Image (tube, rainbow, N blue to C red):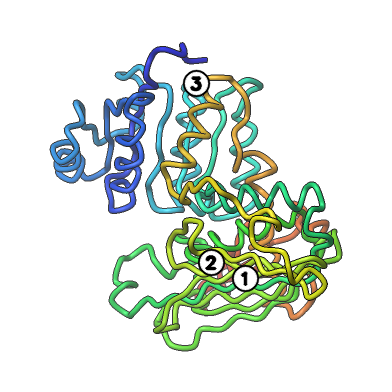
Amino acid sequence: MTHAHHPVRVAVVGAGKIADAHLKALRAREDQATVVAVVDLDADRAAAFASRWNVPAAYEDLAEMLAAERLDLVVVCTPPAAHHDAVVACLDAGVWVWCEKPPTVSVAEYDAIAAHERDGGPYVSYVFQHRFGSAARALREQIRTGALGTPLVGVCHTLWYRDDAYYDVPWRGTWESEGGGPAMGHGIHQMDLMLSLLGDWTEVRAAAGTLARDVDTEDVSMAIVRFASGAMVSMINSVLSPRETSYLRFDFTEATVELSHLYGYDNSHWTWTPAPHRADDGPSALGAPTDDLASSHTAQLGNLLAALREGRRPEASGEDGRRTLAFIAALYESAATGRPVTPADLTPDNPYYHAMNGPAATAPSSDADKEHASA
C-alpha cells in the first residue's frame, strides 16, 4: 500500500495514441501520481513520447523497466493481444495495473490474469471510464434503491464511423490481434456502462455481419439481451454509421433516462423524463444529479488511485470487469451459432471461452493445413 502523502510512481507501457490520453489524465492527478518511465518495443517512439511528456526514463523492454524502476502502477496501452503478457509481468512484479480496453482477447486470458492477483493487491483494473461520470453514478444509486421503479426496457447503441484507412493499422480488424470488431473495440464502452447499471445479464441473442469493411471480424452487430431483473435491451455496435452517436436509454416504471453523446459525456448529455403519472416532477425530483463530473480517464483514475492507497479491489476489476468481456463472448457465440447464449454456457470446454471467434480460431486455414491436421 502506498503512503498517503507520497505520489504513486507510474510507468506507461505502449507509447501509441491512447497513451497520450492517459498522460493527460495522469497530469490532471499529478498531486497523486508521477510518471517516471515509458516502455515501447519501438525505442524511437518511446524516446519521443518521453520527450513530449517530460518522462524521465524510456525503455524498449518491459522486464528491464520493471527491474530498474520502483513502481506502484503501470498503465498498459498496448494492442489488445499484448495485454495478457504485460499485465501478468507487472502483477508478478508486485505492481498494480490499469489496462486499456478490451481487457483481453478472450475470457480465458482474463481468468488466467486473475490468478496473478493477490488479496490486498496488486490488482488490475480495466479502462471503462464511462462508468465514472456523475450522472451514471447517480443513476446507479437510483437503480440500487428502486427510486425510479423497475427497469423494463433499454437501448444501447454505438453508431460510429471508421473508414477503410482506419484499418490500415495491422492489428485492427483481426480476431488474433484485436479480439473482435466494433463489439470489442468500440461498443464495449456503452455495453459496459449498460451492464454496470443493469447488472447481471441472463441471455443474449445476436447477429453480426461484415458489410462494408475489408476486415476479418464483423463491422456491425446487433443483440437482444435479457437481464436478471427482467429488463430487455436492444444493442447495436457499428463502425458504418456516418452520423456518429452513442445512445443509451433506460425505461423504468417511473421515468425514462437517456444519454446521447459520442466519446464522453457530462450531465448536459443526460435527460430524466417522468412517466405520465409523474408529469409534474422535474429532473431534480426524479433524482438527476446536481454535481457534474464528466466521464473520463481522469475520473476513473481518481477511483483507481484511491483503491490503490487503501489496498482494496478497484471497480472495473475482477468479476466486475469480467461481466462485460463474458457478455461479448456470448454475443459472438450467439451471432455465429444462431442460438441464445447464457453465462452458464461460457465454460472452459466452450471454444468461445478461449477465442471470440470460437472454433474458427483453431480451424485449419488451408487445404494443406487440413491435410496436416488429419495426418
Which quarter of the picture shows residue 328?
A: bottom right
Quadrant that contains the C terminus: bottom right
Q: Earlier in the sequence, mark 3 or mark 2?
A: 3
Q: Are marks 2 and 1 in contact (CB under 8 Å)?
A: yes
Question: Residue at (50%, 64%) from the top-left corner?
Answer: 269
Tag 2 secondary structure = loop
> Mark number for residue 94?
3
Near-viewer residue (142 or 161): 142
**Alpha carbon distance from label 1 to label 3:** 38 Å
Q: Which residue is mark 1?
A: 156
Structural crowding at the residue carrying mark 1, measured as other residues with C-alpha within 10 Å and reported as few (<14), some (14–19) or many (≥20): many
The residue wearing badge 2 is 187
Residue occupying image coordinates x 51% and y 28%: 91
Left or right placement of residue 143 versus residue 293 in this view? right
Precedes in sequence: disc 1 or disc 3 = 3
Q: Amino acid at mark 3?
A: Gly
Q: Alpha-carbon neighbours of circle 2 within 10 Å: few (<14), some, or many (≥20)?
A: many
Q: Position of residue 359 (x, y in %)?
A: 65, 68
Q: Earlier in the sequence, mark 2 or mark 1?
A: 1
Nearest the eye: 86 or 136: 136
**Camera-nearest label, 1 or 3:** 1
Q: Name the residue furthest bottom.
A: 211
Q: What residue sits 77% from the left and 72% below the top?
A: 275
- 162 in relation to 177, above or below: below
Disc 1 residue type?
A: Cys
